[in-house]
Image (spheres, rainbow, N blue to C red):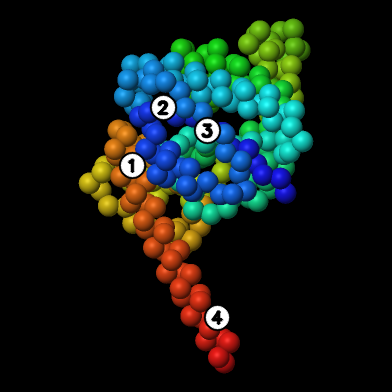
Amino acid sequence: MPRIKMYTCFTDSHKEMFERYFQPSVPDSFELFPTQFEQECTTGEYHSDGWIQAVSRKVEVILGAIESVRNDDGPDYFVFSDCDIQFFSDLSGHIHELMQTYDFIAMDDNFYCTGFMGIHANDHAKFMWEWIGEHLAEYGCDQPAGNGFLKLHRKAHRAKKYLPRFMLPAKYRQHLMIPQMRVGMFPRIEYFNHMHLGTEPSEWDPNSPITFTDEQLGKMRMMHANFTMGIQNKIKLLEIVGEQKRRFDSHNASTGSTERAELRRA
């Protein structure tokens, strides 16, 4: 299967996460397209000065990816990932399987998390991300804007079942120019953030230990250090979770080798 294109963007504030955790962990089955922008957001933290300008660059990258991928010979979808993410396994096969069903799929944070997404490069995606770009100032970020778009999109297609199109508001008729999008969410523990444990506060406390069951560690394909304020706290969270996952995988690998050797001797 051809490599899946993966897009990300970052500024100096996030460069350490990109270089230490994100880039080295990207599986070889993905073709990475990173973009570094100037530091328009003064701290790189959520809703600090320059945040809207920084987020608008992300929208530009996604719109550019849609045009690039839809004109390629490879898969007709791509992945966008924030760089406060690290990967623990080759998840390309799973994403390929999911993208046969969905036009758009994102992490499940009780809403669609735009920090990690699978996107079909089609007219649906172009309409969605142009709409998000136009409404960034209203919503304050691409994530609430994206969720606002999907909510409106569902309402419009539901409303057309009950009313003739000419009676619908203009904002609904705009959404009816394309078929209803097939939208999904990645499985929680597999595509992980600390909220998925159900034991952690909404904003991670750096002094709070995080513990996993073996079953949870065994399922984890990747992690996203969101719901975490401050760049250094994100780095600390990436380190803590990553170390536990690596120890688990290393122990399982050595245990498996021992079990196979014992079977051969038997």
Residue 46 relative to residue 223: left or right: left
Element type where label 3 sits in the image:
strand
Which residue, given by chain and number where applicable, does mark 3 sit on?
A: 34
Q: Amino acid at mark 2?
A: Thr
Residue at (56%, 20%) from the top-left corner? 60
Q: Place residue 169 in its image quadrant.
A: top right
Q: Point out residue 234 in the picture as x, y percentages from the top left corner.
A: 34, 39
Compare marks 2 and 3 and give the one earlier in the sequence.
2
Dot 2: element: loop
Q: Residue at x 33, y 51 (%)?
A: 240
Task: Specify few, some or many for label 1: CA neighbours under 10 Å numbering under 14, 14-19, or 20 or more.
Answer: some
- Crowding near the residue tagged with mark 2, few <14, some 14–19, many ≥20 C-alpha atoms within 10 Å: some
Helix, strand or loop at mark 4: helix
- Residue at horizontal 61%, vertical 17%? 130
Residue 224 rendering spot, x and y as whole percentages: 44, 42
Earlier-in-chain disc, 4 versus 1: 1
Q: CA distance from mark 2 to mark 1?
A: 15 Å
Instruction: Tell me which label, 4 or 3, sits earlier in the chain.
Output: 3
Task: Please state the horizontal and vertical placement of residue 41, each as a whole percent of the image.
Answer: 37, 20
Q: Which residue is mark 2?
A: 11
Q: Are marks 2 and 3 in contact (CB under 8 Å)?
A: no
What quarter of the picture does the C terminus occupy? Answer: bottom right
Element at label 1: helix
Residue identifier under label 4:
260
Front residue of this view, candidates 261 and 241:
261
Between disc 2 and disc 1, the foreground one is: 2
Task: Tell which circle, 4 or 2, labels the residue nearer the N-terminal end.
Answer: 2
User: Disc 4 vs disc 2: which is toward the camera?
Assistant: 2
Dot 3 crowding, Cα within 10 Å, few <14, some 14–19, many 20+: some
